[in-house]
Image: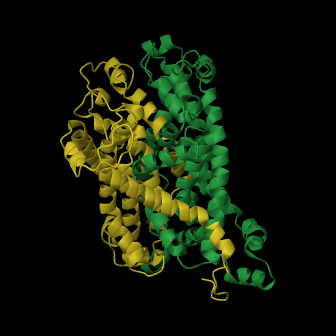
Amino acid sequence: MSNSERPNRLFRNLNAKIASIPMVLTAGVVFVGGTAWTVLYSFTNSKLLPRLNFVGLDQYYRLWATPRWLISIENLLIYGVISLVFSLVIGFLLAALLDQKIRFEDTFRTIFLYPFALSFIVTGLVWQWLLNPDFGVQGVVRSLGWTSFDFNPLYNSSIVIYGISIAALWQGTGLIMCLMLAGLRGIDEDIWKAARVDGIPMWKTYLFIIIPMMRPVFITTLVIIASGIVKVYDLVVAQTSGGPGIASEVPAKYVYDYMFFAQNLGQGFAASTMMLLSVMIVIVPWAYLEFGGRKRV
Amino acid sequence: MSDHAVSLSATSSNPQAGVSGPSGPKPRHVFSRRNIFLYGTLIVVALYYLLPLYVMVVTSLKGMPEIRLGNIFSPPLEITFEPWVKAWSQACTGLNCDGLSRGFWNSVRITVPSVILSIAIASVNGYALANWRFKGADTFFVILIVGAFIPYQVMIYPIVIILREIGLYGSLTGLVIVHSIFGMPILTLLFRNYFTSMPEELFRAARVDGAGFWGIYLRIMLPMSLPIFVVAIILQVTGIWNDFLFGVVYTRPDTYPMTVQLNNIVNSVQGVKEYNVNMAATILTGLVPLVVYFISGKLFVRGIAAGAVKG
């Protein structure tokens, strides 16, 4: 806050206002305006072109009666639970291991984080190859003599979403580990000393002292993972293209396909509004805690 | 600091010394059970993380007959670079058979201006938010940050309309604008936090000397904030290079970025699958962000930590 120079006239701070024009346009026109526009048009029967012909909640009724959407939602839930639980647990465990004052910490961290630098497309294609039933993991184990070995997630519609989750975890846990490590490093050394004086075993210290103290880090991480889950799109496109059949469809892909292929804009808008709603359920309480409690950001 | 503590607890076994020690137990034999468990676990996990990269490289260096007969984990018996050449200059997407090189150059033409534009806008904006606050600025800033969590799918179509209206839909310029818009929340936050943490006196002194908005930015803030610019560049280069959704929505087949073209090459249904070419193409696409990652090292971590934790 620049108390020294309190601008009290409109033109005093003109340059700053000019510099903020892109932000104002982005926040106002694209984020608020665009979102409002999409929500508004989700109540219309727009097909190839957006039209303001209101049909109430028709698009939403149709959406929730479409098997493909229901499968998308189910997949998203499974994928979401797996991502949340496993990336938090694995991320935290890796961070805790790296926090033991080990040697080669940088090397290990570099290895765990490098998949995060790769795109979901690259991730999806690599795992498509690794999980290839003829040449991938299944083929290799079978060629070793265990011919009944069955591990073919990408071509089995009941478990395909788990195959996608494997790839997502490989790509994303490094980031969670880094966030957790930063959180662990932020814990006062004295806490550890006090716990050691009291003779508390290490796992108990982690579980009952350190993790509760890292609550803010966990909340932030949770928000990051959750907002990433809803957006999952490229990974599915690359790894399975939604297949076999429609077994690995996700909401983001539903939106894209209805907007740009099926030429059923109304459905696309309704589906994207549902995505927005699900994100808001996570974000609004968090934003309220983060920004609402304190008056200043 | 840890060395000091360790040496303390090593010299005496009385519990008082343990108080000053760090989390771990007293230094023991290198091959203590704890170390074997610790490093054993880490090495196994590290191998798991490295495996896909290894398989990618190995597959791309084999010929197709060897792939059909052998196992994907075995190193190539006969190293061939032909798949790489083919992926780069001959692989087909639709009717174009000029390989990934087209997508690579498209991605370069998208990434370079997007990175420059988004960072220029966001750094000036963050500076205005940190040092030249005006009424209402914080409101827009909060909208911007919260807006970063809105699924892109919600805003895709309105942007299509805006771009169509100004005649940029399908062009690289349009995509550059889109990347600048969606890079703004995180970058503005990054720069705002950095400029806020700089000493206030510096800014005041420059004001007393008569420097204005742009003068202070160009002569004082910019030279003093090179590290954060590097962090922002790393963040943006990897983010924009890896983008798929915006590329597929806002460009046409001849201007597709590399990720989109890669996906089309590998997942095309026509023709015999050439796994070695596919893997070579995949590595080529991942190469730019990987190189950025391995060169930048700690700064990459700092970028995601700064962007994520404070968000």
Of the 4 image quadrants, the one containing the N terminus of chain B is bottom right
Residue B203 on image: x %, y %: 72, 80
Toward the top, the furthest residue is: B65
Answer with left or right where residue B308 lies relative to residue B199: left
Residue A89 on image: x %, y %: 34, 55
Residue at (47% x, 43% y) in the render: B46
In this picture, is B133 found above or below A46?
below
Residue B59 on image: x %, y %: 51, 23
Residue B205 on image: x %, y %: 76, 84
Which picture quadrant has residue B218? bottom right
Residue at (57% x, 44% y) in the render: B175
Asked whether residue B58 appears in the rendered view, the answer is no
Toward the front, the furthest residue is: A53
Which picture quadrant has residue A222? bottom left
Asked whether residue A266 appears in the rendered view, the answer is yes
Nearest the eye: B195 or A6: A6
Nearest the eye: B172 or A98: B172
User: By what rule are the colours in the image chosen?
Assistant: by chain
In this picture, is A277 found above or below A129?
below
Residue at (48% x, 76% y) in the render: A297
Residue at (47% x, 75% y) in the render: A189
Toward the bottom, the furthest residue is: A4
Toward the right, the furthest residue is: B209
Nearest the eye: A56 or B259: A56
Nearest the eye: B203 or A29: A29
Question: What chain is the yellow one?
Answer: A
- How many discs appear? 0
Hue used for the chain lettered B: green
